[in-house]
Image: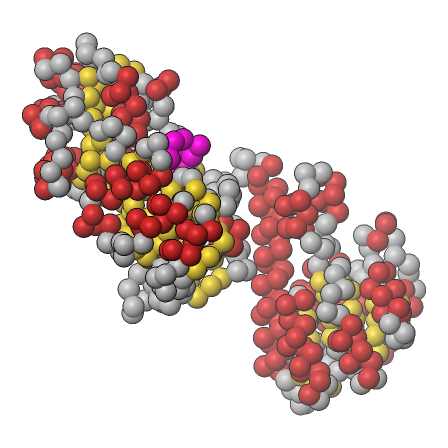
Amino acid sequence: MSTTKIIKSALISVFSKEGLEPIVRKLHEQNVILYSTGGTESYIKSLGIPVVPVEDITSFPEILGGRVKTLHPKIFGGILNRQDNENDVQQMVEFDIPQIDVVLVDLYPFEKTVATSTIESDIIEKIDIGGISLIRAAAKNFNDTVIVASVNEYPLFFDIISADNATTLDQRRVFATKAFHVSSHYDTAIFNYFSILNSDVSIFKASNASGQELRYGENPHQRGFFFGDFDAMFTKLHGKELSYNNLLDVDAAVNLINEFKNENPTFAILKHNNACGLATRNTMVEAYKTALACDPTSAFGGVLIANGAIDNATAFEINSLFCEVVIAPEFDNEAIQILSEKKNRIILLLKDVELPQKQIRTCLNGLLIQDRNSSTDSKQMLKNVTMTSPTSEELDDLIFASKICKNTKSNTIVFAKNNTLISSGTGQTSRVDALKQAIEKATNFGFDLKGAVMASDAFFPFPDCVEIAHQAGISAVIQPGGSIKDELSINYCDENKVAMVFTGTRHFKH
């Protein structure tokens, strides 16, 4: 039997009628028998094209407010019969079942309804039953049946039927593959809606239909893809396509700047996911210039982000620096023109979007999933554990430093002074090494650590870190506490009049 199938009949049942008319007209031109239901049937009739109501096949009307339309043996028999199976052929004749060569479906918009409504009854009614069943049945029987399961596939299907009104086995297999993607994505969305309502469900399902192939992955010999709705978070105003590494840095930048949301003008410069400069000032241009002074060497080729508008003066200063990406929630018009002078510089307008509350990464032959670290240290949660209390200015700097520390690779130590990042030790195998790296970096850039504060992402098991920091000029320390040897660090601070506060919250970042 030939694997090329002539289309003689089609069942059409869609929610959205967009893009349907050319297909219906083309099928009609080719004398294809059209079957349909409800609103789709009425739409086809409005085009002046004959259509057979499904009720004429089933001898049964739509019932339960339209919940049951196509769920009938004569419909599914017409889709699922195997044309090379003698028993199937005989039963088709015996039960007067019409052959259905094409199934064209557009499902109820469940995800769109969830995004726009909080009324549970409305959401439940947008769980498609008949449509999803038609898709699975036709996709299963791709040897004989064509399944067009999404408006996205209309152009391809139209091109095929315009050529010779026949489909090959390979074409039907492609449509089936895409159809199973539609059905699995749809069911995943429904599951995730219910799992949010039932927080005890410890099952992970994900499906993303908006994959974008990147130029390459972390290195040129690796393939890279991004699955997500980038346009929901940013409006890209200028520049080249973002790379895999760009996206990782942008993610780190957004997470960091969110710690300073709705605060005074704050500017951050990041390199390899870590802040190399960050400052809060009265104006954005001063915040930028101060952040750049933290480490102008690392800033080269970095990602820049602001918590407020980038004005013309700030853009003028930025323009003399080679940087990959500039991000802000607002830009002055002239600022965009200035920054666009560099052809490849990426300019992103950051939208106010809530980030996912789950973080996912591959691990071994599976996945690790955790809640987002949504805890930000505040003055209210601090516990003063030393006889010397931090001054008001030191308290501000301690919170400032802790926010940076939380968003820096562990092990990490952060030095800050006057709402400015002085230096940091990042990603070290020991906390002492991180501390020494931070001191060396501060010294290399000529910063005086006298009166600066220190933040640590985890507790000190020994007093060596506070001792080294104190000798370098540090006057106040913020750390989570919790070591069985906390007293050793506390005693050293008391003996040397160093203030230390505990947060009770560890901020490891691996």
Residue 263 lies in the magenta stretch:
yes
Q: To which quarter of the image does residue 505 belong?
A: top left
Please indicate, yes or no, whether residue 220 appears anywhere in the rendered image.
yes
Magenta residues, start to end: 257-265
Estimate the x, y position of residue 434 in percent, counting from the top left.
Answer: 16, 38
Q: Where is residue 391, by image quadrant?
A: top left
Q: Is residue 249 left or right of residue 101?
A: left
Task: State the residue at coordinates (61%, 42%).
Answer: 194
Left of 161 or right of it: where is 298? left
Q: Which of the two residues, 28 or 324, is positioned nearer the viewer here?
A: 324
Where residue 260 sits: x, y (%)? 38, 34
Farthest top residue? Answer: 387
Quadrant including the C terminus? top left
* Magenta-span inclusion, residue 311: no
As drawn, which residue projects farthest toward the left?
471
Q: Nearer the viewer, residue 270 or 209?
A: 270
